[in-house]
Amino acid sequence: MGLFSTSRRTFLLAAGALTSFMDTTTTRLRAFNGPKKHDQDNIYQRLGVRTRINAKGTYTYLTGSLVFPEVSRAMDEAAQHYVYLEELQQKAGEKIAQLLGVEAAMVTSGAAAGIMLGTAACLTGKDPKRISQLPDLSGMKSEVIIQKSHRNPFDHAIRNTGVRLVEVETPEELENALSEKTAMMYFLNAAQRKGQIGLEKWVEVGKRRVIVTFNDAAADVPPVGHLSDYCRMGFDLVTFSGGKGLRGPQCAGLMLGRKDLIEAALLNNNPHEDTIGRPCKVGKEEIAGMCVAVERYLAIDHDAEWKAWEKRLDAMDAVLTSIPGVTTGRFVPDVANHVPHLSITWDEAKLGITRAQCGQELRDGEPSIEVLVDEYPQGMAVTPFMMTPDEDRVVTGKIKAILAARRAEG
């Protein structure tokens, strides 16, 4: 999927303007990551919470990502004023939709909230009675179609609305499952290589049968083109996490798509009372932060950023392959954390340590380091995606020390 072009006009938020984009890679990386010290006094130390080096990627349990400095400033600015929340949602949605070249947009309290609100929109439309009635589906459609291979823990957000998930495996089963009860067809983007029905076919069937198609693309940025590609492909609704690759607030996300469905989702959401989405509050700070996060993300030189990641992996590779018996490789996941990774393998019997043991030692060490282990069965893997400058040297040094110590013991 190709990158898309978008306006680069300066977006002013409150009284503050976004800072200009830095040209050099070194300066840009500093601005992108922000300052981070593991030995300085901070709120986490005062609470007795360990900070971690994230050599793994964007994971919710690891608190996603580090926000852009511009995002933090925008959130601070937003916190100093009162506004009508509905007006802010409307204006922010219009701005984000304009930036991304999609029909409509809204800021949610996360991708999972987008899943639930999108489903609710398909069930209720803008009908106040139906909105207050959920999850009682009396008089409404009651089923959502999902491929069996796309079942995942987050589809609980769909079931929150009271619908029944109908599993299908083949195109023929999909056609037969669609009925007057069908409210939506849900597609898990991370599982697009699984199952027998791909993105284009899912959209084609939905258009032909006049059923809303929903793409859960939560962690699928980068590449930047995904922010508009799926809407252009024909999906009626698409949701993204705001606190992962977009580097926005942790408790925020985006839902993009058809204007009528976005409007219905907003009516099912906070601040409207007696709605299924009332607990999914997204505050003025998060809405403002997401606006700036989107524009900041679009301003990045993504080609230069990719080359910078590769250069950091080159340095890590040189250190790790200097350890006798250690081999490395490169890979990029198809979807989710779609960035360069370095795989690290060794003969566990000869070296006397398994990748799980190495991963645990890294986690228990000081500083604590998170790497890919269980999620990557071929070995252990790291990525500079969420590491701040210089942390890659710390990570490689720790891995080398652990493996060298085991070799010396053997």
Image (tube, helix red, strand yellow):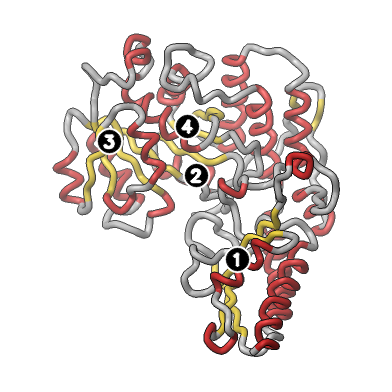
Label 4 to label 3, Cα distance in Å?
17 Å
Q: In which quarter of the image is residue 351?
A: bottom right
Residue at x 54% of width, y 76% of height: 354
User: Residue 113: which numbered mark, if any?
Assistant: 4
User: Residue 218: which numbered mark, if any?
Assistant: 2
SS at mark 3 in the image: strand
Visible residue check, residue 239: yes
**Amino acid type, mark 2:** Ala
SS at mark 1 in the image: helix
The front one of 247 and 174 is 247
* Image x and y of residue 352, in percent: 58, 84
SS at mark 2 in the image: loop
- Nearest-to-viewer mark from 4 and 2: 4
Q: Residues within 10 Å of mark 4 (few under 14, many from 20)?
A: many
**Amino acid type, mark 1:** Gln
Residue at x 50% of width, y 67% of height: 376
* Image x and y of residue 152, in percent: 37, 47
Q: Name the residue under label 3.
A: 144
The front one of 351 and 141 is 351
